[in-house]
Amino acid sequence: MTEKEKMLTGQLYSAVDQQLLEELMAVKDIIHRYNALPPSDSASRLAILKNLLGHIEDDTIIINQPFYCDYGKQIRVGKRFFANFNFTVLDEAPVTIGDDCFVGPNVSIYTACHSTDPVERNGRKEWAEQVTIGDNVWIGGSVTILPGVKIGNNVTIGAGSVVTKDIPDNVVAVGNPCRVVKEL
């Protein structure tokens, strides 16, 4: 099994594998081109996103620049997706985002996991856990979503929250760690 196959199946893999490093560099070049485009050139921005991301449900996607991701192909977005400035997705595992989702500025989604043991961590081995976000979700500015989290449908995540655990449908959740404060 290749290191990439291990990564995509949630197994421990080498983050310094040559194939993975080459793919990361190629995506960085694509992201650099995307972020350098004039914001008014929506056709070129959409063309790059269609080639970069794993799945885009329709042509109404808007991701303001700058945007950052690791691989791109593990990111799937639904209809009418909007992400504001500085959207960062570390997509070593799948990141699935539903329809009608809005993402505030400076939001980060992480799938990569590292050992808390410094000796293990320094071996550059890691694993990844997918993130899933339902339909009709609003994620406020400067939210961080950690590996393995599932956010339900019809959810608002308050600005500055750190989402460490699953969030059910039809709620408002805020804080660090993020917790439900209101049912809808």
Image (cartoon, rainbow, N blue to C red):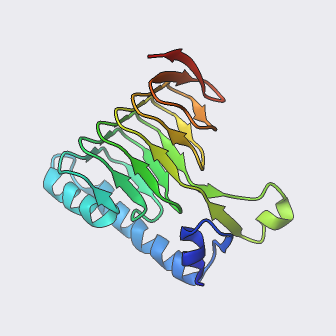
Count of numbered labels shown in the rendering: 0
Pick the front one: 181 or 41: 181
Determine if residue 41 is in view.
Answer: no
Pick the front one: 30 or 130: 130
Q: Residue at x 30, y 47 (%)?
A: 78
Residue 109 percent coordinates (x, y): 51, 47
Q: Residue at x 46, y 49 (%)?
A: 88
Residue 25 percent coordinates (x, y): 46, 73
Residue 7 percent coordinates (x, y): 58, 70
Q: Residue at x 55, y 39 (%)?
A: 144
Pick the front one: 98 or 118: 98
Quadrant of the frame with the N terminus: bottom right
Q: Is residue 175 left or right of residue 27?
A: right
Residue 10 image-quadrant placement: bottom right
Q: Residue at x 44, y 24 (%)?
A: 170
Q: Is residue 85 left or right of residue 70?
A: left
Determine if residue 39 is in view.
Answer: yes
Q: Is residue 184 above or below residue 41?
A: above
Residue 164 percent coordinates (x, y): 64, 38
Q: Is residue 122 left or right of residue 36?
A: right
Q: Is residue 87 left or right of residue 1?
A: left
Q: Is residue 71 above or below residue 37?
A: below
